[in-house]
Amino acid sequence: MISQLGRYEILGELGQGAMGVVYKAKDPLIDRVVAIKTINLGLAMEEKEEYEGRFYQEAKAAGRLNHPNIVTIYDVGKSGDVAYIAMEFLQGRELRDILNDSGLLPVDQVLDIVAQVALGLSYAHEHEIVHRDVKPSNIMVVRDGHVKITDFGIARMASSAVRTQTGMVLGSPKYMSPEQVMGKNIDQRSDIFSLGVMLYEMLTGQAPFNGDNVNAIMYQTLNAAPSPPSLLNPDAPDMLNFIVAKALAKAVDDRYQNAKDFAADLRACRDTLPRSGQVLDVSKSPAGGEKKLPDAISVTGNRSVEEDVGSISTAKLSQAFDSGAATMRLAALTTSPEEVDELSKTLKLVRPSTEAINRAAPVKNAAARMPPVAASRSAVRQDKREATGTGSGVGNFLLFVIVALVLLGIAAIFI
């Protein structure tokens, strides 16, 4: 990981962005923590020009915007083959992560979040900026449920020198508007459609347009009419069916014409609902924190394998203990000759002689002296042998009974 970008001191890595790495950094001039979004410009010349142009476009687009629901841009620069934008460091979580962890949120919370996004988009649209990629992973929720729109990386300004080629599709397929799918010129109403898709997903737990591949999703976006949200979520009032239908209208003229009207309807609907009183958890796990895995249960069901391994590792063994020879003797007692030969080759140990094996305890008592993990494994093998009837008098007896019954049945037929 790099330690410096321009004047900024890199403190850690926050994640991978669409075009590069995002770092947590410190501005030493004013002692402020910032987020640094980077793009590696070590590309072919054509790619470099396109990506660098789009990168600085994001800085110009978002840098012109000063709104409570849009992330604040502080600075832009370049260091070697790395271009970067210094922006507001947000203490919160991506909406995508919240939805993945929490499932369906209370309807009043959903409406509050989407209304805030709509207000932020409305401000951007008033400044002739279309986001083009509205989706949960580009929405940050910070303390007290406050929402910030991020990543204007593929936004287009009227004065931008970076032009989208005819027929070139930008955005995320699941959240694209019909006009985006067809590669047509878009305006603010495309963002409204994408926000409508996000609203539907938050209300129902599923996307309105889905499929096994991109083509299937695009076909549905152009042709399918999703079920009303109230059919999938009984907590959603009927008023939301009309709001969603208007936001997801295929024809741009039938859609909300501006995001401010969309936000007004969402808040009017929210005001008719009882407040859930729930507070979103936007805390993050500490960086580098370990994820505890579920305990692995041993075949005995009494102790976990982790506990067994712990007891083995902390046991004080005699320095005279011949671990290599003991391993081979234990293998000879509990596995087949073929497995012993394979283990001998792998560990490059001498196969124990018959005398060495005979000096060891009988097989039936071996499990009592085995380490717990080895005993568990031996028990599994024994269970398998018993299940197949090998090495077991009971298995042979059952086989005899079954054969006898079959023969008696055949005899009864002929009599």
Image: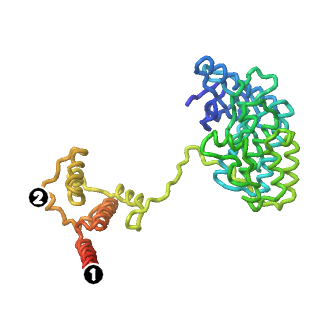
* Figure check: 59 above or below 243: above
State how far apart marks 2 and 1 are (Cα).
55 Å
**What crowding class fits label 2: few (fewer than 14 Cα within 10 Å), some (14-19), or many (20 or more)?**
few
* Figure check: 142 above or below 273: above
**Residue at 70%, 30% in the rendered image:** 86
**Residue at 34%, 59% in the rendered image:** 373
| Image quarter of the N terminus | top right
Report the residue marked by disc 1: 412
- Residue 117 location, x and y as percent? 79, 43
Number of numbered markers: 2
| Quarter of the figure with residue 131 | top right
Q: Residue furthest left?
A: 355
| Quarter of the figure with residue 58 | top right
The colour scheme applied to this rendered structure is rainbow
Going by the numbered disc 2, the residue's amino acid type is Glu
- The answer to whether 112 appears left or right of 2 in the picture is right
The answer to whether the residues at label 2 and label 1 have Cβ atoms under 8 Å apart is no
Going by the numbered disc 1, the residue's amino acid type is Ala
Residue 343 seen in the figure: yes
* Figure check: 371 above or below 23: below
**Residue at 60%, 25% in the rendered image:** 40
Report the residue marked by disc 2: 355
